Image (cartoon, grey):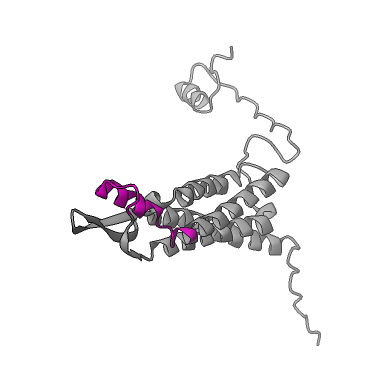
Amino acid sequence: MEYVTAVPHPRSEADGPARSGRRSLALALLCGALGAAVALLATRQRWSEGTATVAGGAFPLTAKGSDVTGVPAALAIVGLAALVAVFAVRRAGRLLVSALLALSGAGTIAAALLGVSDTSALDEKAAQAAGDTSATVDALSHTAWPYVAAVGGALLLVAGLLALRYGRNWPAMSGRYERDGAPRPRRRAQAVDPDRPEDIWKALDRGEDPTGA
């Protein structure tokens, strides 16, 4: 009696990189979009607060992230644009854009953390409120929003590092040309019977001239 041993089909060598590419692409998109949104949201919140002495009384002052520094918001927009541009370029261009995405994240982190101890925005508001250029803010305190902005930058950095590592396996937004750069051949126009209105409408839907001119 003969026994037949089932032989498993070998997986294609391209399956591994393809799966890694899909997972890394989804993760990079999530991290990049979420990171930019978090950083932009954080810069619109209150980062610091304090008081200024005006006419013998304490005048409360607050400063938003955009008052302290505009760098995190600007870099978040740059990072988001770079994330989209990754799919519009290939090879060396994709590598450069991926590096820009990673640098945008790193810069956002650095600017946000530097903003934690920055008092210039509140000092300027204190000088305006007191009418004295030498006036400074008192009872200074900071919120957690600068650290939230730094988290957004970290997510952008992760997206950039993923693009640098796995970006070569990601698809590109190019439907007009093949990989060798040659234009794809156009399909031959189907014959249109001028006596059949349905053929004429189908030709118009395909973008063809039903008159044959």
| Count of numbered labels shown in the rendering | 0
* Side of 124 relative to 102 (left or right): left
Q: Residue 115: tell me if it is visible.
A: yes
Residue furthest to the top in view is: 213
> What is the magenta range?
114-135
Residue 48 appears in which quarter of the rendering? Answer: bottom left
Q: Where is residue 87 in the image (x, y as percent from the top left)?
A: 60, 46
Q: Position of residue 20 (x, y in %)?
A: 65, 63
* Side of 49 relative to 209 (left or right): left
Residue visible at 74% across and 69% down in the picture:
9
* Side of 66 relative to 2 (left or right): left
Residue 90 appears in which quarter of the rendering? Answer: top right
Q: Which quadrant, please, contains the C terminus? A: top right
User: Is 120 part of what is drawn in magenta?
Assistant: yes
Q: Which quadrant, please, contains the N terminus? A: bottom right
Q: From the viewer's side, name the closer residue of 131 and 182.
A: 131
179 vs 155: above or below: above
Q: Where is residue 123 in the image (x, y as percent from the top left)?
A: 35, 53
